[in-house]
Amino acid sequence: MIFHSPFEFSYLWLPLIGFIVGLFGTMIGGGGGFFFLPVLTLLFHVPPHTAVATSLAATLPICIVGTAGHYRNGNIYPKIGLIFALAGLLGALTGAGTNNFLTSGQLKTGFGIYSILIALHIGINHRKMMKSETNRAVVPDCFGLKKTFKATFFGFLAGFITGTFGTSGTAPVLAGLFSIRIPVKLVIGTSLMIIFVNTLFALGAHFLVGEIDLTLVYFLTAGALIGAFSGPRLLAGIHLNRMEGTIRKGYALIMIGLGILMIIS
């Protein structure tokens, strides 16, 4: 169901929040959807099921703008992205159906547990890569069975998370791309491409079974689009390979913090 909620003065903060999420979402490859759900539920007390569908609707414009910007800058690896996206399509439709069977409390707790588990995975995978003497990020010439399995598994998981929680499935996408070991800028651009596809199909499913608050979408999108246009431009001048470890650790810590808040709220 699509509806417009009554205007509240607190909504005037949403364009600023949208700008920040859009800016950093396109710079870390997440689209920002991971942050919309906890912001809407914890700060604006939006019912979780409404927040899920609304988060997807607000994330989609960020993904479109961010993917186009990264494509122009050559930061997308289509072959890997296609495998993730195809698996994510099935996952998104499955997740949207699962969402209907969860209570609000289960939805928030499930999101919190998922956040913590994926953050731990990112941290463990980072430590393994640091110990490896041959840890050099390169674009693979071929895509073997092991990497195809990883892409399929993480792609389906990302789509399922997108459909269930409305968070764009950033964490499993990044975890999967980092485990394949490609350059960080390709991780970011390819991640946005994958998340765009997942978000599009999950949103389509939620049009049928979910509740989308267009008032919230308008305010979030107003700032998010500006941030999404700015992110790829800023990223073009940054040497991210030197900052890869810091990016991973920072992202994992934020995920753990939000996950705990969602569980205890």
Image (tube, helix red, strand yellow):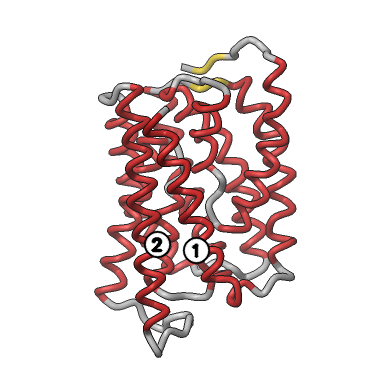
**Residue 238 or residue 78, whichever sits in front:** 238
| Residue positioned 63% across, 52% down in the render | 24
**Which image quarter holds the C terminus?**
top left
Please state if 86 lies on the left or on the right of 240 as rendered. left
Q: x, y percentage for residue 2?
A: 51, 18
Q: Are marks 2 and 1 in contact (CB under 8 Å)?
A: yes
* Residue under label 2: 122
Please state if 79 lies on the left or on the right of 145 as rendered. right
- The amino acid type of the residue labelled 1 equals Arg
Which residue appears farthest toward the bottom when viewing the image? 133
135 up-or-down from 125: above or below: below
| Residue positioned 67% across, 40% down in the render | 224
Which image quadrant is residue 128 in? bottom left
Q: How many marks?
A: 2
Q: x, y percentage for residue 179?
A: 37, 70
Which residue appears farthest toward the top when viewing the image? 6
247 up-or-down from 30: above or below: below
Identify the disc placed on residue 73.
Answer: none
- Label 2 and label 1: CA atoms lie apart by 7 Å
| Residue positioned 53% across, 40% down in the render | 35
- Count residues near mark 1 (Cα–Cα under 10 Å), then give few for <14, some for 14-19, many for 20+: some
Secondary structure of the residue carrying numbered label 1: helix
Q: x, y percentage for residue 261?
A: 44, 35
Dot placed on the residue nearer the N-terminal end, 2 or 1: 2
Secondary structure of the residue carrying numbered label 2: helix
- The amino acid type of the residue labelled 2 equals Ile
* Residue under label 1: 248
| Residue positioned 59% across, 71% down in the render | 243
Which image quadrant is residue 153 in? bottom left
Q: x, y percentage for residue 220?
A: 65, 32
